[in-house]
Amino acid sequence: MCAVVEQPPGAGELTLAAVTDHLRAEGLSVHKLPERLEIVDALPRNETLRKVLKYKLRERYSGTVK
């Protein structure tokens, strides 16, 4: 599983370990934790409602864990 994160300008560096630690502290099941972290400048969004286009993320980041 891959977590794709859009960070605001000036935000501190985000690591996979920090993300998984936070998610575990919030009670997320271990099998749902991301195995990979991708940080992007902007998430793909539609023009009308600005919703994240998940299918574009799946197309780009699906496959084997790196």
Image (cartoon, rainbow, N blue to C red):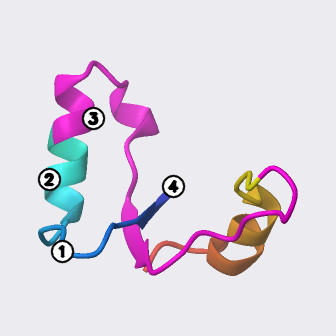
- State the residue at coordinates (14%, 72%): 13
Binning the other alpha carbons within 10 Å of mark 3 as few (below 14), some (14 to 19) or many (20 upward) gives: some
Query: In the rendering, which numbered label is found on residue 1?
Result: 4
Who comes first in sequence, dot 1 or dot 3?
A: 1
Residue farthest toward the front in the current orientation of the protein: 48
Please, what is the three-letter code of the amino acid marked with disc 1?
Gly
Q: Which residue is mark 1?
A: 10
Say which of marks 1 and 3 sits in front.
1
Binning the other alpha carbons within 10 Å of mark 4 as few (below 14), some (14 to 19) or many (20 upward) gives: some
Residue 55 as seen in the image, left or right of residue 64: right
Please, what is the three-letter code of the amino acid marked with disc 2?
Ala
Q: CA distance from mark 2 to mark 1?
A: 17 Å
- State the residue at coordinates (74%, 56%): 50
Q: Compared to 57, does 48 lie above or below?
A: above
Query: In the rendering, which numbered label is found on residue 23?
Result: 3
Q: CA distance from mark 1 to mark 3?
A: 22 Å
Do tag 2 and tag 4 residues touch (Cβ < 8 Å)? no
The answer to which image quadrant residue 52 occupies is: bottom right
